[in-house]
């Protein structure tokens, strides 16, 4: 463990300990097969051409080191957000994610999907093998969540109560099926679906707050929102902060680790400076995730 890593880990843990929390519950972290992750990093290396802002990967490390870093930060639960960009990938990614969760006990077994023949079957199989969260990326996958091929999959996820972290906002660049419209139509069809809106729907924050107020099972994750980087790209409307307080038990910590252009602690500081209170912050950083996933890991405290 490097001296720098140790100092960073200590700083994160000190912040969390100051709130009286056992650790962190991060619902939006990425672990993928190596060749897939390298392609994701290559995308971010070039994304400055789309956004006008460079996106350096802070934690461009080998898998073992990335797991170690989250442990140093006191992250008690995290995810392996995987997502396909074409047909034929999702089943393979689900199998990889199942194996990863098997060897990394802190990781919630993660699944994904794509509109293709057999999607309902492999989603059901993944749930049966213990998948506790799914990731859907409408921008990268470039598909409508209301594609009829997905009906069986959405039905299975809704019936099982498995949360789905869905990238559906139009940041960092819009897609054909991003924005509140497609997700609004999906929820009208499956109102009990446990959707977690990634990045709070950046940049369509207000529209996705509307959906969270309309549907009791809709939640929002904090991934990158309020950080200095995101505020330059898509600032959160200051007048909407009071709505975050009202939805306090449905806001979850997400980080996008390792694919972030700043240190992990900055996301925590960005949430603190909203000044919505320690009770709200404790829920976001740990309690709300633990409640959603019925996780007993809260009984464990980091050293």
Image (spheres, rainbow, N blue to C red):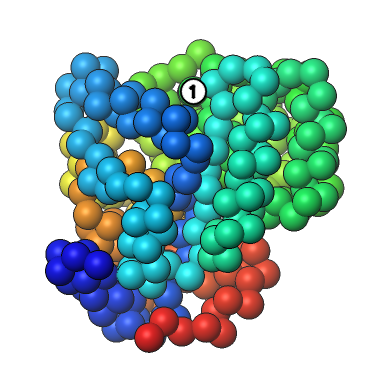
Q: Residue at x 68, y 54 (%)?
A: 132
Relative to 127, say whether 69 is above or below: below
Q: Residue at x 80, y 18 (%)?
A: 117
Q: Quadrant of the C terminus?
A: bottom left
Relative to 141, say whether 287 is above or below: below
Q: Is residue 215 left or right of residue 15?
A: right
Q: Residue 255: x percent and y percent?
A: 38, 52
Q: Residue furthest top?
A: 176
Give the image quarter of residue 86. top right
Q: Nearer the viewer, residue 21 or 233?
A: 21
Q: Is residue 160 left or right of residue 244?
A: right
Query: How many numbered marks appear?
Result: 1
Q: Quadrant of the N terminus?
A: bottom left
Q: Residue 21: x percent and y percent?
A: 42, 81
Q: Residue 169: x percent and y percent?
A: 46, 31
Q: Is residue 269 left or right of residue 291?
A: left
**Looking at the image, can residue 110 be seen?**
no
């Amino acid at each position: 463990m490097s001296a720098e890593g140790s100092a960073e880990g200590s700083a994160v843990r000190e912040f969390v300990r100051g709130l009286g929390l056992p650790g962190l519950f991060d619902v939006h972290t990425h672990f993928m097969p190596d060749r897939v992750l390298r392609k994701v990093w290559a995308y971010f290396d070039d994304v400055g051409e789309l956004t006008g802002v460079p996106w350096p990967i802070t934690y461009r490390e080998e898998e073992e080191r990335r797991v170690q870093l989250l442990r140093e930060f006191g992250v008690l639960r995290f995810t392996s957000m995987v997502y396909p960009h074409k047909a034929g990938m999702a089943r393979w990614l689900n199998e990889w994610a199942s194996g990863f969760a098997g060897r990394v006990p802190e990781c919630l077994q993660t699944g994904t999907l794509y509109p293709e023949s057999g999607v309902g079957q492999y989603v059901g199989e993944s749930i049966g093998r213990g998948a506790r969260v799914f990731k859907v990326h409408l921008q990268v996958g470039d598909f409508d969540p209301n594609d009829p091929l997905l009906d069986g999959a959405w039905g299975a996820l809704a019936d099982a109560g498995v949360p789905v972290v869905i990238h559906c906002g139009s940041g960092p660049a819009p897609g054909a099926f991003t924005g509140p419209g497609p997700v609004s139509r999906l929820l009208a069809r499956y109102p009990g679906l446990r959707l977690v809106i990634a990045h709070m729907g950046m940049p369509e924050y207000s529209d996705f707050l509307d959906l969270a107020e309309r549907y009791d099972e809709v939640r929002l994750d904090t991934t990158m929102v309020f950080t200095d980087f995101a505020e330059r790209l898509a600032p959160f409307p200051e007048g909407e902060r009071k709505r975050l307080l009202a939805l306090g038990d449905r806001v979850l910590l997400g980080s996008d680790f390792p694919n972030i252009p700043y240190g992990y602690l900055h996301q925590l500081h960005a949430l603190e400076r909203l000044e919505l209170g320690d009770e709200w912050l404790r829920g976001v950083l740990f309690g709300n995730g633990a409640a959603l996933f019925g996780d007993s890991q809260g009984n464990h405290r980091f050293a």
